[in-house]
Amino acid sequence: MRTYHPLDSKLLCGALGAAGLFCVLEAAGRTGLIDPAAFPLASTVLGRAVALLTDEAFLSDVASTLGVWASGLLITFAVAVPAGFLLGTSSQVERALRPILEFLRPIPSIALIPLALAVFSERFDMKVTLVVYAATWPVLINTMYGLKDVDPLAKETLRSFGFGRSAVLWRVSLPSTAPFIATGVRLASAIALIVAISTELIGGGSDGIGSYVLESSGSVDAVQYVTAAAIWAGVIGVLTNGLFVLVERRVFRWHTARTEVV
C-alpha cells in the first residue's frame, strides 16, 4: 500500500487552491464583476499562456532569463559561502565588516540599475551582477548563522583528539552548516529570478522575460500577453523552488528529521 508523504498533501492543496482561484476569476469575468474589456477572462489568459509554449521568441526569452538566473546563482554560491565561512569563523573580521554589510544589505538591487547601466556595457554582465548582489545576502547570512549553530561540544571533542582548526571546520562545521546554506540558496533562487526579470523589464535589452513583457505591453492584446508571461514566470519560480525543496529533503533528510523531533 502506498503511503502519502506530507509533500503530496501540500501539492494537492496547492493545485486545488490554483484551480479555485481560476474558477473565481472566470466566474467574475463571465458575470460582469470584472469587465472583460479591462481584464480578459481567466480561460483566455490561460489559453494564451499555453500558446506561448509554441512561441519560439518567448521560449528564447525564457532561456535567456534562466541563463542569467543560473549564472548569478552559481557566482553567488561561489562568493557568498566562503565569505560566510570567513565572517562566521572570525569574530574580528565580522566586527570589521559588519557596518559595511549592514549599510549595503538594505539597498535594493533595482535602485542600482542606473549605476549598473553606466558601469557595464554588456546587458548580460549588468543583469548577472545585480542578481549576485541581491542573492548574496540570504546565502551569506544563513552561512554565518549556520556556523553559530554548530554544536560547540562536537568541536571541542574533535579538538581533544588532536584535530586542527581546518579539520574541525571540514568534519563538523561544514556538515552542520550545509542545511542552512541549502536554505539560503533556495531563498536566493527566488530572489535571483525576481531580480533577473526586473532588470530585463527596467534596464532594457532585447532578450529575457522582462523584455518580452515590455515589448508586449504595446501590442493590441497587451493584457493577455503580459499576464500570460507573468504566469510562466510564476510557474518557473514554483518549479525551481520545488526542486530545491526536494533536494533539501533528500540530501539533508537527517536534518529534517532532527528538527521535526525537536
Image (spheres, grey):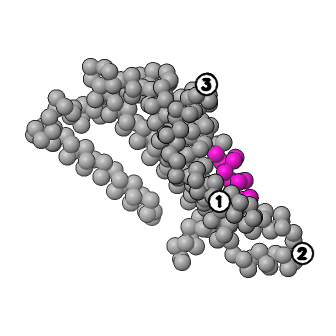
Upstream in the sequence, badge 1 or badge 2? 1
Whole-number angstrom distance, CA of label 1 to CA of label 3: 32 Å
- Is residue 145 shown to the viewer in this render? yes
Which mark, residue 162?
2
Q: Nearer the viewer, residue 108 or 71?
A: 108
Which mark, residue 17?
none
Q: Kindly report which numbered mark, 2 or 3, lies closer to the viewer in this rendering.
A: 3
- Corner quadrant of residue 217: top left
Q: Please report the bounds of the magenta region as a residue range.
A: 76-86
Q: Nearer the viewer, residue 227 or 135?
A: 135
Q: Is residue 43 above or below residue 89?
A: above
* Kind of element beneath mark 2: loop
At label 2, counting other C-alpha atoms closer than 10 Å, the crowd grade (few under 14, some 14-19, many 20 or more) is few
Which mark, residue 98?
1
Asked if the stretch drawn in magenta spans residue 251, the answer is no
Q: Kindly report which numbered mark, 1 or 3, lies closer to the viewer in this rendering.
A: 1
* Kind of element beneath mark 3: loop
- Is residue 246 shown to the viewer in this render? no
Q: Kindly identify which residue carries mark 3.
A: 122
The residue located at (29%, 25%) in the rendering is: 222
Upstream in the sequence, badge 2 or badge 3? 3
